Image (cartoon, grey):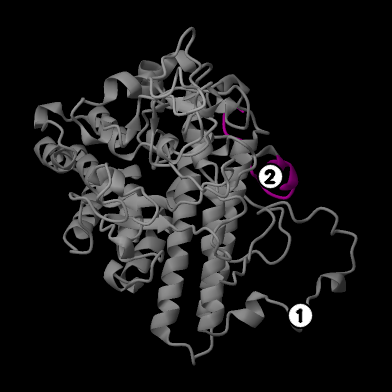
Amino acid sequence: MKRILFSAAALLGLAQGLSSCKKDFLDENPQSLYTPQTTLVDSLGFEAGMTGLQAVVRDMYTTTEPQGLLGVMQVGTDAVSPAMPQGVEVPYYNYEKLQSQDGGAAFYWTAAYRIINNANILIQAAANAPSSLRQGYKNRITAEARFYRAYAYNFLTTLYGAVPLVLEPIATPRTDFTRAPVAEVNTAIINDLTTAIPNLFLANKAASGRITQGAARQLLAEVYLRTNQANLAEQQCQAILTSNQYKLITARFGVRASAPGDYYSDMFIIGNQRRNQGNTEIIWGIEQQLNVPGGQNGNGGQQRRMWVPGYYNITGMLIADSLGGRGIGRMRLSQWVDYRLYAAADMRNSKYNLKRKFYYNDPSKPALYGKRVIVTGSDTSVRITPYITKWNMYNPVDEFGLATVKDLPMMRLGETYLLLAEAQLKQGNTAGAATSINVLRTRAQAAQVTAANIDLNFILDERARELIGEENRRITLVRTGTLIDRVTRLNGSSITGLRPENLLLPIPQSEIDRNVGGGLTQNPGY
């Protein structure tokens, strides 16, 4: 499918080199180009524009450069430790290296504002679209764009605090941005989502991969929790659960239903990840597809290379589909996850979901073939280490396996119950929170819990059990104010230099430097 990307190179850095140009140099008179003015005039144009916006969002999580980018959201947390001392993720566990020119912070800042500017263009264009375009359609396109804008601003204000609030397209250079107070940004996010929800389709009427009421409600619930409005968060979660649009997966399904496995692992198999493929639990997934024009961005993502260890470097081991394809193990599960998080009977700890044992599989090494791999000497933590299987992906025509071309499960019903439990806990309803969590534990065949077990740490433990490898763990711990405590207690041996100032990321210094006419200040500590 043709995609049109309406994106700024950066939010702030467009003014250099323009001050001495004649004014008419900037005048545009496109005759046959794809631009918002010539394209966003009918449903075909808006669909192409929405495809472009979706591609920009997808690019945020599937860009393969800089290497290690996904580790920014995972390493240096309670659940994930570093395994390779290189790449853009290093300052996120060696925090003394985190500074204002950090590459990871700059990438995610720019990526979020690309989403915002693209969303703003669609929102403005829909408002100005010809009357021949149905109002209901314009409302729905606007609602989807508002969702993406709200998602990007929630991402930004969680990680950076106060940020520039830009609600209209940027068409000319600006160097006068200031940081809007967090409360003002929150108000804009909530307004976008509450406005969007009535104009979005329910899941049973939405096209695959499109934003639904359920996705907007789930994001709004998270925002309400972050802004200490737990009662409103609970309302959004309950609305999802009572909508009859989603159902927890509790039975084998899909393309490998007759093969060894379990129903939890079925959700993460290519061919099973979408609602129209039988996944009744998915609320929002970013879709990717091999060998389809526009079906993936660039090289398709680093997920498998990050999560799956480099086992093939062990003599007697070959790259195999059953082992997840070729990983390089840039990060690994923390010892807390490996040894203390799961009960043995928990389905999420089964061999189909958390791979712990390796067996030599190279028939040219008969002395080893079929025997269990036993690590000797120091644990490399790169070649042989327990790993989650959610990002297993093998393409026989690309055994080297640079690309991870799987759907990205951004939201599913399992998290809805966890957000609900958190909202109930914040209102003092520990019994209700236990009931919500027990729904997931029943599905996982894990022991039930009681109100006495419930506190925020237990809910965060359960989030790790349920959502590891799916959620951006850093965002969860920053949002709940628990990053320092949980990292120190549960993964402190692999982290250095963590300070309270690191709860917020640095504003990219390049943005501050270019913003000569505004007041774009730096976060403390950088």
Q: Residue furthest bottom?
A: 132
Residue 21 location, x and y as percent?
A: 89, 64
Q: Quadrant of residue 80?
A: top left
Q: Name the residue beneath numbered marker 1.
A: 30
Q: Assess disc 1: are there few (<14), some (14-19) or many (≥20) residues with their C-alpha within 10 Å of its C-alpha.
A: few
> In percent of the image, x 19 and y 64: which residue is there?
243
Q: CA distance from mark 1 to mark 2?
A: 30 Å
Q: Earlier in the sequence, mark 1 or mark 2?
A: 1
The quadrant in which the N terminus is found is: bottom right
> In percent of the image, x 53 and y 21: which residue is there?
315
Q: Name the residue beneath numbered marker 2.
A: 511
Looking at the picture, which amino acid does disc 2 mark? Glu
* Magenta residues (range): 510-526
Residue 505 visible in the current orientation: yes
Answer left or right for 280 relative to 441.
right
Residue 124 visible in the current orientation: no
Q: Quadrant of residue 45?
A: bottom right
